[in-house]
Image: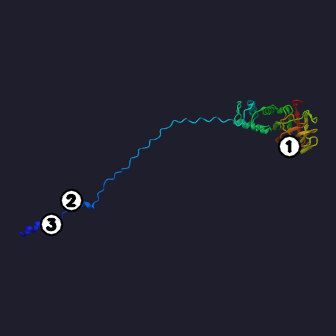
Amino acid sequence: MRRLVVIVCAATLIGACKPSSSTFDSATTPSVAPVVDSSPIASPTPSPSPSLETPPASPSPAKPACKEGKHQLEVEQALNELGGYGKLSADGQQSDADCVAIKKFQTRFGLRPIDGVPGGATLNVAKRLLASDPGRCGAGSGLTACIDLTHQTTWIMRDGKVIHGPTVTRTGYDHPDGKGAPTPAGSFKIIERQRSNYTESFDVYLHYWQRIMGNNGFHETTSYIHDMSLGSHGCVNLLKSDAIAYWETLKVGTPVKVFGRRPGT
């Protein structure tokens, strides 16, 4: 009897030592409640619908820098034929390229104003230059200065080729003051040269003076060369740039051929 009791107690003690799943203490394990965001949900901002805007107007074409002139087409054609002033459109309508070319021409030949407008004076000079015929000079094989009285132009030739010009000049006529006369035609030579020649008759210095005959010679003009009512008293007036070129090229003894006749003489 005593042995049986011991076995039962031992079994009872062993069962008491086994933990049960229900023995966990809920107080030691914190419970976590689910977090709920109570802030209002923002509605998405609608994208603005594309507006129907009027497209910008095309800019108006810019006006040429220079005004259109009365002799637009004629000057465009003449300068293209002369060459050296840029390609002109030759359509009778002013353009920026035409303006630049005409100003270049006006600057070269001392025309006023230098405005790019192809007026009568610009056309007159262009036509005179085109009409100048080197073959009429009768220049030899050496260096020769040529003066065309008819077209009031001049140029320098060497070995039968033009090396300077044609350019504008103004020769003598029956001057109202009685001190001048038309420049005569003929064959002459440079007979004297002075960098500046003072003339008592007119109380003026004649720069780049090169005497041709009598009291007449090449020199820089003392007045606006395109005003035919002024000068010359018989001399061959030149623009400053041409007077310098003639001074640097010609020398005493250089042949000078003068032909034609100045209009109005």
Residue underneath mark 1: 247
Location of residue 108 (image quadrant) = top right
Please state which amino acid type lies under the numbered disc 3. Answer: Leu
What is the secondary structure assignment of the residue under circle 3? helix
Q: CA distance from mark 2 to mark 1?
A: 132 Å
Q: Where is residue 35? Give x, y as percent.
A: 33, 53
Report the disc number at residue 68.
none
Q: CA distance from mark 2 to mark 3?
A: 19 Å
Which quarter of the figure is the C terminus placed in?
top right
Q: Earlier in the sequence, mark 2 or mark 1?
A: 2
How would you rate the neighbour count of disc 3 (Cα within 10 Å): few for under 14, some for 14-19, many for 20 or more?
Answer: few
What is the secondary structure assignment of the residue under circle 1? helix
Q: Is residue 139 visible?
A: no
Please state which amino acid type lies under the numbered disc 2. Answer: Ser
Q: Say left or right for 81 vs 221.
A: left
Which quarter of the figure is the N terminus placed in?
bottom left
Q: Where is residue 128? Give x, y as percent.
A: 81, 32
Please state which amino acid type lies under the numbered disc 1. Answer: Trp
**Taking 251 as reference, is 181 above or below it?**
above
Residue pictured at 90% horizontal, 39% vertical: 217
Extreme-bottom residue of the structure: 2
Residue pictured at 8% horizontal, 69% vertical: 3
Comparing marks 2 and 1, which lies closer to the viewer?
Answer: 2
Location of residue 43 (image quadrant) = top left
Report the disc number at residue 22.
2
Q: Nearer the viewer, residue 211 or 3?
A: 3
Q: CA distance from mark 1 to mark 3?
A: 145 Å
Q: Where is residue 226? Give x, y as percent.
A: 83, 35
Residue underneath mark 3: 13
Location of residue 80 (image quadrant) = top right
